[in-house]
Amino acid sequence: MKPAVSGQALWRMGAMLILAALQACATVPHPDARDPLESFNRSMFGFNDAVDKAVLKPVATGYKAVTPDWVRKGVGNFFNNLQDMWSAVNNGLQGRGLEFSDSVGRVMVNSSIGLLGAFDVASDLNIERHTSGFGLTLGRWGVSPGPYVVLPILGSFTLREVAALPVDMKGQPKYNIGDQDTRTWLPIVDVVDLRAKYLNVGDVLDGAALDNYSFMRDAYLQRQRNILYDGNPPEEDAAP
C-alpha cells in the first residue's frame, strides 16, 4: 500500500500552490527580495496559525498534560533516531565524512543499546547530531534556495526544500513503515510531540509587538543559511 500522502501528490500540491502564489504576489507593492510570494505566504501563514490554535495546540497541550516527561522524552528520542537515519544518508551524499560517521554511529548505538532510539545513549557518549535532509543536500550541491514559501499545514520552506520534499518523503523511515496504520500515525505523533515542546513560543510571539509573519520568515531564512554555511554565511549571500 502507498503512504497516506505520497511524494508525487505532495509535489503536485506544491506546484499548484506556487502557481497560485505567482498570481497573487502582485498584490504586495514592495515585497522582500527573498519573499516575492508574500501575499500568498501571508494567507497561508494565517491559515496555518488558525489550524494550530484550533487543533494542533489543544492536542499538544492535552498530550503534554497526560504524558509523563520521561515518556515524552523517549518519544522524542525515538523520532530523532529515525531522523538520524536519513541524516546519515544526506551527510554521505554531501561528502561530509565526520558528520556521516557520527550519524551512523548514533543510529547504531541508539537503535541497539538505546532500545530502538527510546534512550539517547549516543549523546551520553558525546556522539554529536548532524541533522540533514535532501534540501540541505541540494544546497551543498550548489542549488539556490529560491523564494520563501509557506505551504498549508506543512509551514515554512524555501523553493529548494519544496523540490526536495518528495525525496525526503521517500527517504525518511517514518513514512515508509510497512504497516499502513503505523505509517499514518507516526508522522502525526511526531508533529504533536514536537508542538508540545514549543507550546510557549506562540504565546511569547503573540504577546510581543511584532509582525509574527515577518519575524518567523526572517528567523527561518537566517537559520537555513546558518545551517548551510555551518554558522558562517557570507555577507554577500544575504539574498537568494
Image (cartoon, rainbow, N blue to C red):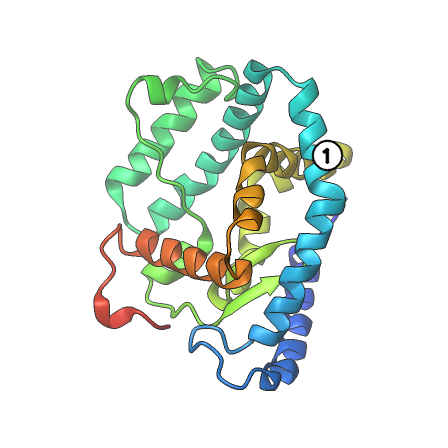
Q: Which secondary structure, mark 1?
A: helix
Image position of 56 with respect to 65: above or below:
below
Q: Looking at numbered disc 1 in the image, what kind of residue is underneath it?
A: Val
- Percent across and percent down for residue 176 are 63, 40
Instruction: Name the residue located 61 percent from the left edge and 81 percent from the top edge.
Output: 22
- Percent across and percent down for residue 227 are 33, 51
Q: Quadrant of residue 195?
A: top right
Circle 1 is placed at which residue position? Answer: 59
Instruction: Name the residue located 50 percent from the left edge and 58 percent from the top edge.
Output: 210
Q: Is residue 178 visible?
A: no
Quarter containing the C terminus? bottom left
Quarter containing the N terminus? top right
Instruction: Name the residue located 54 percent from the left edge and 27 percent from the top edge.
Output: 76
Front-lying residue, 189 or 219? 219
- Give the number of callouts: 1
Q: How crowded is mark 1: few (under 14 residues within 10 Å), some or many (20 or more)?
A: some
Would you say 98 lies left or right of 218 here? left
Would you say 10 lies left or right of 32 here? right
